[in-house]
Amino acid sequence: MLEVSEPLNVWLVSRNLEVARRFYAEQLGLPLWREEPGRALHFGFGGGVLSVHTADDGNLPPRGSSILFTVAAGIDAVCADLARHGIAFEQPLADRRFGRSAMFRDPDGHELWICQPSAAETQFDRWRQSRRVRTRRVALKRPMKVRRHEPKPVSHRPAHPTSL
């Protein structure tokens, strides 16, 4: 359902792992990759992992966290599909300077954004990716002209007798 185009590894905390499981697996459609019973859920998405851990003593960070999921195309259909699965958008789908996006929250209050980057952002991303894989070019020195010296002739005559 939520097809993410940019790999990302994210770690969130939750008051209730069962509520988090229903939200991320059933409503967002992320596949559960691994579970640590009573401790964490690990969902796969876009080549990365979203880990949801139990909050110590039920306490969450004061502001929560924000995650930006990117899709390559078809954000209107993705948002419509999410709405059919019970997602209520706090900020509806709109054109913004970085692309089309919408914001909703998970059951613990974390901001989740879905975004289809604009052409300018896509160009920036291509540039960023090209910078990652570009190898550093090192100027090669011109080969020095090698002077070949003939080895000194070795005499095979017996050594001079030493004077007594």
Image: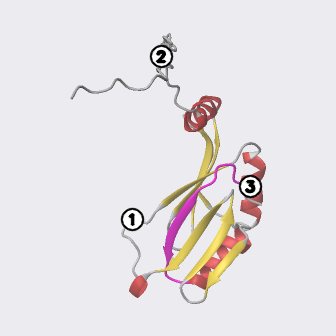
> Which residue is rendered at x = 39% and y = 87% of the image?
57
Amino acid residing under circle 3: Glu
- Please, what secondary structure does the residue beneath circle 2 have? loop
> Which residue is rendered at x = 56% and y = 37% of the image?
98
Camera-nearest label, 2 or 1: 2
**Quadrant that contains the C terminus:** top left
Q: Residues within 10 Å of mark 2 (few under 14, many from 20)?
A: few
Q: Nearer the viewer, residue 40 or 23?
A: 40
Q: Nearer the viewer, residue 139 or 57?
A: 139
Q: Position of residue 46 (x, y in %)?
A: 69, 56
Q: Quadrant of residue 124?
A: top right
Q: CA distance from mark 3 to mark 1?
A: 27 Å
The magenta-colored residue range is: 4-16
> Which residue is rendered at x = 61% and y = 46% of the image?
101
Q: CA distance from mark 2 to mark 1?
A: 85 Å
Q: Earlier in the sequence, mark 3 or mark 1?
A: 3
Q: Which residue is the site of mark 3?
A: 3
Q: Which residue is the site of mark 1?
A: 63
Query: Is 144 placed above or below 61 here?
Result: above
- Please, what secondary structure does the residue beneath circle 1 have? loop
Q: Which residue is the site of mark 2?
A: 153
- Residue furthest front as drawn: 164
Q: CA distance from mark 2 to mark 3?
A: 78 Å
Query: Is 160 placed above or below 130 here?
Result: above
